[in-house]
Image: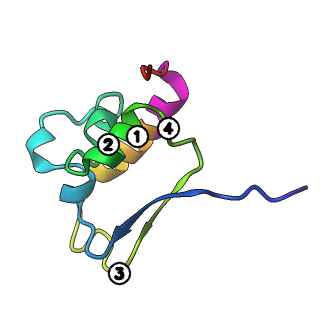
Amino acid sequence: MPQQQTKVVAVLGNDISTDIIYPGRFMATVLPSETPQYAFADNAELNRRLKAKEIPPGSAFVAGTNLLPHSKDTISLSSRRGLREYSSRTPSTSA
C-alpha cells in the first residue's frame, strides 16, 4: 500500500499559543461547527485559505518550539475538530 504524503500548508514559527490558533475575542463561540471560521483569525491569508477550503484534509501545519505553552484550554482542540468537520461537510464558498 503506497504511503500518502502530507502537504505542509503553513509554517507557524515558535511560541504558538491558543490565542494564535483561536483568538480570545471569539471565546463566546466554542461550538466545533462554528469555531473554524475564526481559526487563525489574525493571520488573514491563512484564515482566508481555510475559509475558502483551499487547504485539503490531511494537510499539516508546522510549528517550531513551544507549541501551546502553558495551555490547558480545549478551544484549540475544538477548533481543530471543527476544521476537520467544516472542511469535509461545508460546501465551498469560493468563487
The question of residue 69 being in magenta is answered with no
Q: Position of residue 7 (x, y in %)?
A: 60, 56
Instruction: Judge the density around disc 1: few (<14), some (14-19), many (≥20) Cα neighbours within 10 Å.
Output: few
Query: Real-space Cα distance between discs 3 and 4?
Result: 26 Å
Marks 1,2: beta carbons within 8 A = yes
Residue under pointer 3: 65
Residue under pointer 2: 47
First in sequence: mark 3 or mark 4?
Answer: 4
Marks 3,4: beta carbons within 8 A = no
Label 4 amino acid? Glu
Marks 3,1: beta carbons within 8 A = no
Residue under pointer 4: 54
Left or right of 74 in this view: 29: left
Q: Nearer the viewer, residue 76 or 60?
A: 60
Mark 3: secondary structure:
loop
Label 3 amino acid? Thr
Q: Is residue 64 above or below residue 52?
A: below
